């Protein structure tokens, strides 16, 4: 081996060693920069939507739709920062804003505001408050929508899920069992309504079925839980959905 070739090989070896040592640090720096960029972008978005919300709220000429859109955008960015209490406050104001927009008829904006507020309470792990919102939407939908409207199935599923989550926080076995039974009743109503609307093999039905798997499991009804599980798996397979079982 000539001296020149040896020097070249030695230089390559040193280069590889240096690269191996510095790459993890470079990779970590890149990832940190990405995270910082995301945080900075999100903060700018929060400030932008906050200004839009304040402008819409303080402008007497702004319409209800403009105020709702600005509030929803601001609350969504706050939720992205996990500032759930602030988001819930905005959604509570949205609910007041939509109350009374429609008399003796379906109030879509009020129902949407209630759904947003329910989601904020869920993020705060305040399931009883979320249940109040979801139950209010259910009653409103049952009063003003056709009996087989799929939105009622959505509401029944949401109420059933809240009762399940509330049950998991109960200390007394009897209290837990009562909540689980209530959850199962609402979820089975939701599934029956989906089937009436020819949606028994839909992704919505699969979601309700998986909720029933958990509820029946915790009621120690193993046969029902297994049957619901098989149906949910069949739907997921038919839709090519890869789902992690609960």
Image (spheres, rainbow, N blue to C red):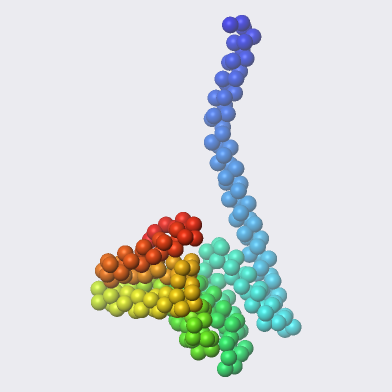
Considering every residue shown, the one lying at the far top of the view is 2
Residue 164: quarter of image: bottom left
State whether residue 10 is above or below residue 234. above
Question: Front-most of 35 and 98?
Answer: 98
Residue 137 visible in rendering: no
Specify the quadrant that holds the N terminus: top right
Left or right of residue 84, residue 246 in this image:
left
The residue sitting at the right extreme is 61
User: Which sits in the foreground, 197 or 189?
Assistant: 197
Where is residue 83? Give x, y as percent.
53, 66
Residue that appears at 70% across and 82% down: 63
Question: Relative to 127, does residue 22 appear above or below in the rendering?
Answer: above
Q: Residue at x 55, y 25 (%)?
A: 17
Across and down, in percent, residue 107 comes to 58, 86
**Picture layout, residue 101 above or below residue 238:** below
Image quadrant in which you'd find residue 91: bottom right
Query: Residue 96's quadrant in the figure?
Result: bottom right
* Quarter that holds the C terminus: bottom left
Q: Give the residue at x 63% y 55%.
A: 40
Q: What number of labels is visible?
A: 0
- Residue 69 appears in the rendering: yes
- Write the residue at 72% across / 81% down: 62
Asked if residue 60 lies left or right of residue 15, the reply is right
Residue 80 rendering spot, x and y as whole percentages: 56, 63
- In the depicted structure, whether residue 10 falls above or below residue 156: above
């Amino acid at each position: 081996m000539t001296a020149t070739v040896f020097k070249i090989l030695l230089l390559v070896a040193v280069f590889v060693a240096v690269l191996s040592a510095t790459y993890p640090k470079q990779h970590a720096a890149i990832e940190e920069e990405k995270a910082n960029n995301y945080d900075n972008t999100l903060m700018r978005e929060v400030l932008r939507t906050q200004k839009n919300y304040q402008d819409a709220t303080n402008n007497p000429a702004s319409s209800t739709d403009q105020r709702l859109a600005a509030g929803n955008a601001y609350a969504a960015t706050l939720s992205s920062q996990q500032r759930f209490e602030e988001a819930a406050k905005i959604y509570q104001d949205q609910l007041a804003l939509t109350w009374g927009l429609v008399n003796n008829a379906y109030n879509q904006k009020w129902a949407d505001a209630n759904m947003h507020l329910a989601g904020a309470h869920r993020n705060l792990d305040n399931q009883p408050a979320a249940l109040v919102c979801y139950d209010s939407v259910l009653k409103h939908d049952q009063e003003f929508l056709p009996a087989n409207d799929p939105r009622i199935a959505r509401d029944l599923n949401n109420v059933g899920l809240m009762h399940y989550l509330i049950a998991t926080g109960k200390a007394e076995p009897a209290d837990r069992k009562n909540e689980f039974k209530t959850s199962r009743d609402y979820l089975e109503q939701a599934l029956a309504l989906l089937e009436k609307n020819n949606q028994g093999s839909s992704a919505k039905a699969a979601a309700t079925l998986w909720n029933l798997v958990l509820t029946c499991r915790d009621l120690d009804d193993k046969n029902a839980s297994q049957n619901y599980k098989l149906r949910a798996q069949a739907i997921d397979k038919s839709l090519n959905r890869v789902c992690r079982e609960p």
